[in-house]
Image: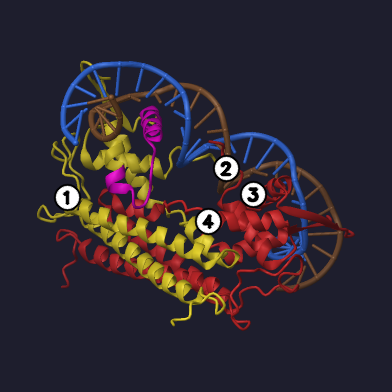
Chain colours: A red, B yellow, C blue, D brown
Amino acid sequence: MDRPEAYPITYGVLGLLAYWGPLSGYDLKRLFDQVLSAMWSAAHSQIYNELKRMKELGWVEMEREEQESRPDRKVYSITRAGREALTNWQQQPPAVLQLRDELLLKITFGSFAPPSAIAETLRTGIAIHEQRLFQYRKNTQYIPVPDQPRQTSGRPNPYAQETNNEEDIYFRLISRFAFDFEQTYLKWLYEALEIVEKGGINPSEAQDPL
Amino acid sequence: MDRPEAYPITYGVLGLLAYWGPLSGYDLKRLFDQVLSAMWSAAHSQIYNELKRMKELGWVEMEREEQESRPDRKVYSITRAGREALTNWQQQPPAVLQLRDELLLKITFGSFAPPSAIAETLRTGIAIHEQRLFQYRKNTQYIPVPDQPRQTSGRPNPYAQETNNEEDIYFRLISRFAFDFEQTYLKWLYEALEIVEKGGINPSEAQDPL
DNA sequence: TATATCATGTAATCGGTTACATGATTAA
DNA sequence: TTAATCATGTAACCGATTACATGATATA
């Protein structure tokens, strides 16, 4: 078997191009952070790499916008082949998720640290996930409506549901997932913290109230 | 700043050794799959690598058990320095979680595929996560109680809670997380499938009931 | 004055995966 | 007879991260 020519992140960038029309690498990085940060992250260097890769595959085209006093903007748009690749990817079964959450690992072996350290780890987690929930709330209020109208290039998307200009149903599903996930995670973190703080007091350490 | 000398997976292996006493690389791989698969995965090659790394760091010691007709078992145990490293790791704030879930990426750009393909993706996800839930249920029934009693080598763990031989509270917390997570995920998958299947029927495609 | 934004890239590194390699025993 | 289990490793590759590189404009 040959190695695949593209990876999830490739399709992440491709999907953004398909949905929000012609964009530069810089724009894509920002969109990526805003729209896809919940399920995938990417450094800008990687996005530029994927653009190069996709250009070689013929999935995107590039047009140079000249600028003064700044590097030229290189604006990419999806090609017909790119659209086909995107749709084709949708037909393959997804790879299985691996969590790889360091916080969970630390809690697993919590018995090898003082409970105060575990509590601190849980509090860090709470801060992180509360902030994410906050970010999601902010982002969903205005999922980026780009300056350019969608589908400026190429034919309109044949599979798009007519939703009377409402939000794309898939975006709504994903943001619902993100909320559910963060809320479940946070609920668990708070409960765990309570248990650790309660059980963490050894009788020998406990202060006598008088 | 220097690069860190160890990574989450290093501490995963180290934690297993701290908890379940002397083990071979082969044993560790199986334990890893059983205990840590929910939050981290590892190929056997990587586990052998981590053992080598930790031996150089002085975190583990190796003893060779000779065998006939099979490669010798190399049995590793954690050292005092290893215990200190594990506890020290617990004091550092955890790295933030990145999901990297291809299924979610596919759903995000669901509008570029026929709804039947999205439904199929969701069904694959349902199968995967139902199976995980099933696995977790099986594993929690007997979290591996090794042949050797815990803490055969070295002093007993000073931070371990006395739980009257009940399950470690941290293991209980983690398995609760795993359940909560899978249940939340599954609930969302079923709801999403329903929405996609309903909305996915174009009036032109819909069969007239008579 | 210093930070943030705009704008693009290259280079080095490395954690993690996949494939390669070997070979006996036991159960279906 | 085929597959699984036991048992250990090496080698190649690569996706992803981090650091390096440049430099103007606008804002606090």
In whole angstroms, how far apart are the C-alphas of marks 2 and 4? Answer: 15 Å
* Residue at (73% x, 57% y) in the render: A79
* Residue at (46% x, 76% y) in the render: B198
| Circle 1 residues within 10 Å: few <14, some 14–19, many ≥20 | few
Of the two numbered discs 2 and 4 in the rendering, the one whose residue sits closer to the viewer:
4
Badge 2 and badge 4 both on one subunit: yes
**Picture mark count:** 4
| Circle 4 residues within 10 Å: few <14, some 14–19, many ≥20 | some
Question: In the shown orientation, is residue A47 left or right of residue A200?
Answer: right
Q: Chain of mark 3?
A: A
Q: Position of residue A126 (x, y in %)?
A: 40, 66
Badge 1 and badge 3 both on one subunit: no
- The amino acid beneath tag 2 is Pro
Question: In the shown orientation, is residue B138 left or right of residue B110?
Answer: left
Badge 2 and badge 3 both on one subunit: yes
Of the two numbered discs 1 and 2 in the rendering, the one whose residue sits closer to the viewer:
2
State the mark number for residue A4.
Answer: 2
Residue A185 is covered by the magenta coloring:
no
User: Along the polypeptide, which appears first: circle 2 or circle 3?
Assistant: 2
User: Along the polypeptide, which appears first: circle 3 or circle 4?
Assistant: 3
Of the two numbered discs 1 and 4 in the rendering, the one whose residue sits closer to the viewer:
4
| Circle 3 residues within 10 Å: few <14, some 14–19, many ≥20 | some
Residue B40 is covered by the magenta coloring:
yes
Element type at marker 1?
loop
In the image, the segment drawn in magenta is B33-56
Element type at marker 2?
loop
What residue sits right under mark 4 in the picture? A91
Nearest the camera: D20 or B48? B48
- The amino acid beneath tag 4 is Gln
In whole angstroms, how far apart are the C-alphas of marks 2 and 3? Answer: 17 Å
What residue sits right under mark 1 in the picture? B142
